[in-house]
Every structure is written in structure tokens, then in C-alpha cells.
Amino acid sequence: MKRIKTKDYVEMSKRACRKVIEAIERSDQPVLGLATGSTPEGLYDCLIEAYKKGHVHFGNVTTFNLDEYIGLSPDDENSYHYYMNEKFFKHVGLPTSQTNVPKGNTGDNKRACEDYEALIRDAGYVDLQILGIGENGHIAFNEPGTPFESRTQVVDLTESTKNANARFFDSIEDVPTKAITMGLKSIMESKEIVLLASGVKKADAMAKLIHGDVSEAFPASILRNHPNVTIIADEDALSKVRD
Ligand code: GLP
């Protein structure tokens, strides 16, 4: 894994933004894999700014998001679909027809998972996947213990993840207990992966990712088996990593 250490969150976001623009420029039909959470918000802001200045266009871009809560409709303010529309898609002219977010409210989750895998395959797989990381090492919603062979599936969220995400909801009771998420194998099929991390809260996870074992107990460790991963993280997130 390549590693880029930035001085802070703003620089992390700018470096990631440059990577995304390069990926878009490299391909006639770029396919981006996108993440939610607080970490990529600066990246989306930077891409919006670049779009407004005419430095990047999304006309031929297709996007796939990693995950969505089960039971929330796309217009629910806490859904990841809503997050993506509000924080990114609507600002860069990305029409719904070019964006994909797993569907957590169809009533047929098995079908929704299979359909999502098929959509990614038909698009020729993800060229550049953006990832965040959970404090317990989850990527997307693949919690510790998720098989490395997993594909898009419905999962139970751990207490740790529900607690971490409760800040977006009125109360912890409102945090959904299940999510639909791309699996670890689906993520590993991306041609290139950029993992973002910022802040001391991620320092233990980053130390484990870089120095720990490759193990299903720490889902992000699967990335060590991927040939093209770049970690872009700030000094705080890398404060427990040996150089
Ligand atoms: C969430 C998301 C992940 C995200 C992670 C970290 O639960 N499902 O895709 O990477 O947690 O979130 P944050 O960036 O807010 O720390």
C-alpha cells in the first residue's frame, strides 16, 4: 500500500480530489466508487469547486456507493442516498441515471444485493474506489468477522458502528440496525482504491491496518492483498504508525 501523509484534513481532501480528477481524465467512461461518512465531505467540496471552475466534468461518469441503511427511503434525511444528493450529486450535475446507491427499502434485499453486483459488473467494475475506515476497522459496513469472500449483502451493524454514527441521528434508537453493503470481495474488484483517514480517532485503526495481521477480525486488512491501494491520511490519523 502506498501512503501519503498530509498535514491536515484539508490537505488530505485536496490530494484525494486530485486523484479522483486524474481517474476521470484517464477514462472515456470512468466508474467511481464513493463513500459516505464525515471523512469524504472535504473531497466532495473540493470536487464541487473544481467542477464550478470547469476543471472537471461528470458527464461520462458513473458512480457506485458502498452502502445504505436498511429501511430508509432515498429521500430520508439520514439515508446515504440523501447524503450523496445533498453533498455531491446535485452540485455537479450528476443525474440519477448515472449514480447508484444500494437500495435498502425495496422489501426484497436478496434481489437488491444481486442486482447491485450485476450493475457493477455491467459497468466494467469500479476504476477508483474511495474508502473511509471505521474505528473497528470496518470498510463500507463490513464489520469485524465479515468473510473476505463476501459480496453485496445485508449485515447487522455493531454497537460500535451504531454509536459512531448516532451523531447523525436524533438518538441512538433511531440508528438503523441493518445495512446493505458491498462486500469485501466486491470492493477488492476495484482497479484502484484510495483509503482516507483523518483525526486521532482513526489512529489505532490505521496502525492496525498498516502493521497488524491480515485477518477477517479487522476487515480493512484485506486491502493489503490489493495491488493498487493508496492511503491518504493526515498526521493525526497516522500518529501511531511507524515510518
Ligand atoms: C460508516 C460508513 C463507512 C465509513 C465509516 C467511517 O459507518 N458506512 O463507509 O467509511 O463509517 O465514517 P467517518 O468517515 O464518518 O468516520
Image (tube, rainbow, N blue to C red):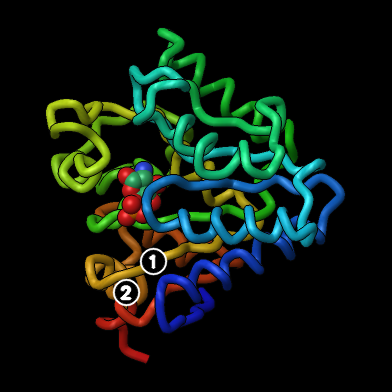
* Number of on-image labels: 2
Q: Residue furthest top?
A: 107
Does residue 147 appear in the picture of this structure?
Answer: no
Secondary element under disc 1, as helix, strand or loop, is strand
Q: Amino acid at mark 2?
A: Ala
What is the x, y in percent for residue 45?
55, 56
**In percent of the image, x 22 and y 27: which residue is there?**
177
Q: Which residue is mark 2?
A: 237
Left or right side of 20 for 113 = left
C-beta proximity under 8 Å, tags 1 and 2: yes
Q: Nearer the viewer, residue 210 or 67?
A: 67
**In percent of the image, x 46 and y 81: which residue is there?**
6
What is the x, y in percent for residue 36?
44, 45
Left or right side of 236 for 80 = right
Q: Nearer the viewer, residue 54 or 31?
A: 54
Q: Residue furthest right?
A: 28
Q: Quarter of the image containing the C terminus?
A: bottom left
Left or right side of 11 for 50 = right
Secondary element under disc 2, as helix, strand or loop, is loop
| Above or below 200: residue 63 | above
Q: Amino acid at mark 1?
A: Ala
Q: Which mark is residue 53?
A: none
**In percent of the image, x 46 and y 56: which residue is there?**
40
What is the x, y in percent for residue 159?
14, 40
What is the x, y in percent for residue 216?
30, 52
| Above or below 180: residue 184 | below
Q: Which mark is residue 197?
A: 1
Q: Quadrant of residue 134?
A: bottom left
